[in-house]
Image (cartoon, rainbow, N blue to C red):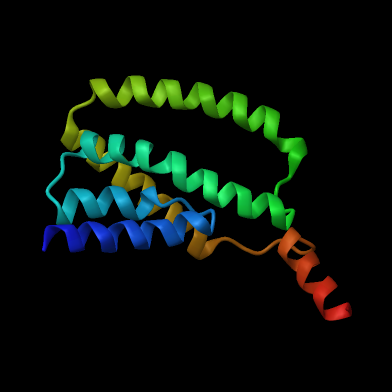
Amino acid sequence: MAWFLYVLIGLASGVISGMGIGGGAILIPALSIFCGMEQQAAQNTNLMYFIPTAAVALISHVKQGNIEKRSLPPVIILGLAGAAAGAFAAVRMDGSLLKKCFGYFLLAMSAYEIFRREKKGGTQNRKNEGMRNA
């Protein structure tokens, strides 16, 4: 029965990853809560899971023209620096503190998504306008 749980978790987080949202938001809590995995192990599993799922999602998004190439260099460089700093902190942090920090992060991101206002003329709005005018 445990394998079925892993299949469901992998499928749900894969769908979210394909949307570009980040499957770790589902994968890490699910592995910790439902599979009893320690927080560091769940986060490390997420890092290995991320590589192939990100590659598949990236190919799809590149084909659709959804990549803003001008923003890539600074985001990649600072993302690598942030990943190194985060990994350094995560392996030295107590698992329960790491779990709380991750939970607060997810809570803050959820609140932001719920309460943020849509910008007029955003990318999605321009795409919708183009579809309506076609």
Residue 30: % across, % down: 24, 55
Q: Compared to 70, does 103 lie above or below?
A: below
Residue 51: quadrant of the picture: top left
Residue 21: % across, % down: 50, 54
Q: Compared to 54, does 65 lie above or below?
A: below
Q: Compared to 128, does 22 lie above or below?
A: above
Q: Could you tell me which residue is drawn at 36 percent across and 24 percent down?
A: 87
Left or right of 65 in this view: 53: left
Left or right of 28 in this view: 15: right
Q: Could you tell me which residue is drawn at 61 percent across and 24 percent down?
A: 77
Residue 13: quadrant of the picture: bottom left
Looking at the image, how many numbered discs can be counted on the residues? Answer: 0
Residue 35: % across, % down: 14, 52
Q: Front-most of 1 and 43?
A: 1
Q: Front-most of 117 and 127?
A: 127
Q: Could you tell me which residue is drawn at 46 percent across and 50 percent down?
A: 22
Left or right of 53 in this view: 73: right
Residue 28: % across, % down: 29, 47
Task: Tell which residue pokes out farthest to the right in this image.
Answer: 133
Image quarter hosting the C terminus: bottom right
